[in-house]
Amino acid sequence: MHVTRLDIHQFRRFEQVHLSPAPGLNVITGDNGAGKTSVLEALHLMAYGRSFRGRVRDGLVRSGQSALEVFVEWQSCVGGDDARARPSNADGADPVARIRKAGLRHAGHAWEGRLDGQSVTHLGEMCAALAVVTFEPGSHALIAGAGEGRRRYLDWGLFHVEPGFLPLWRRYSRALKQRNALLKARASDTQLDAWDHELAEAGEPLGRHREHYLTALQPGFSRLAAELAPTLGETRLGYLPGWRRDDLSLADALLLARPRDLQSGFTSVGPHRADWRIEFSAVPGREALSRGQAKLTALTALLAQAEHHAAACGEWPVLGFDDLASELDRSHQRRVLQWLLASRAQIFVTGTEPPSALADVASRFSLFHVEQGQVTRGS
Ligand SMILES: Nc1ncnc2c1ncn2[C@@H]1O[C@H](COP(=O)(O)OP(=O)(O)OP(=O)(O)O)[C@@H](O)[C@H]1O
């Protein structure tokens, strides 16, 4: 898929900007604080319902304004009714490209969205339609940070490639909320039994989906890690289910944890506590990674996910790289850019200048310049 139009209104320092990006490589330059990151952030907001720099109420709406608006138009070759379905090209013909449109108005807490001219009731509907993978200075948290980011990474992939995952995830989240409320209210065993059952019914398959997904990412991850970070040695991804799954069913684990959970008022076992880790043959563990290595590992994970998405859904997600040149040295920039250009995905790269390695790998790209709250097309 590729974005053909991006309109941003009352978003951070932008009053109103409009961008018509090219299908290939788009480079967005500007001075510090000009608003380059904000362009990627607006796209990310539409695709995730949140910014990679925190929540909407943490300053995305332009000061003095009550709401921001983002409008994205993109070309997709996958059907609109189920964006996760593979394109039907049994006769070998190219899938038909289709223009899709989404608009989002966000007032901090309240939001309104439209997808292809229809109002949407769940932000998730827009997030499932537009797939964007963003690498930004905070991305190293995917490796070095808390488990929540790593669970979100798996879930994002699954929302797009596995149609049955979203209802399962919603069912699990609802059951977890109910169980936690009952624990806080010190409800009876009979009431808790019902929600333990529901949690286990949704949680077991949810965990299996995540584990299968991680297994599916392994070959691409290993290949990319060998290209981008060969000094780390061989890599192996491992799923941690969130309970002692080898010994117990989730239903039994919940029952066993109940006295402790009643004390604390929250559910201590289950897929909401799941995680995944990477083992490296040449490094003792993620704690031993340098910051640069953690960034490269995070980048490897994101690119592996994008590649898997392309294979599973029949088209690449849009790829955004914030400040690539300050995140990676020149030789890594070159390797990443070469890989990206070979993918034929739509790519956005920001920087105070075009990345130095670009001269080694690309003679043609579309340039945009951000200055004084405006985005202009460069030459
Ligand atoms: N809610 C807001 N209202 C108005 N201006 C804002 C708001 N939030 C952020 N800004 C301004 O918007 C700009 C955000 O810039 P952004 O982070 O996108 O810049 P950048 O070009 O990526 O900068 P850098 O190169 O320093 O990373 C900054 O000038 C910041 O002061």
Image: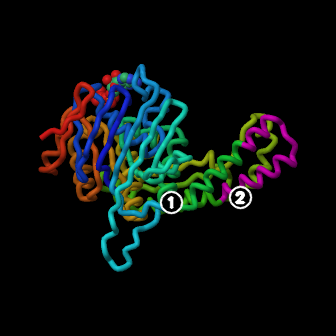
**Relative side of 177 to 308, left or right:** right
Residue 294 lies in what quarter of the image? top left
Which numbered tag is attached to residue 213? Answer: 1
**346 above or below 177?**
below
Q: Which residues are magenta?
A: 178-204
Report the Cα–Cα distance between label 2 and label 1: 19 Å
Residue 205 placement (x, y as % from top left): 64, 60
Q: Nearer the viewer, residue 73 or 357?
A: 73
Quarter holding the N terminus is bottom left
**Relative side of 30 to 259, left or right:** left
Q: Residues within 10 Å of mark 1 (few under 14, many from 20)?
A: many
Quarter holding the C terminus is top left
User: Residue at 70% of width from left, 45% of height from top?
Assistant: 176
Q: Amino acid at mark 2?
A: Glu
Residue 41 lies in what quarter of the image? top left
Q: For residue 254: magenta?
A: no
Residue 62 placement (x, y as % from top left): 39, 25
User: Residue at 81% of width from left, 52% of height from top?
Assistant: 194
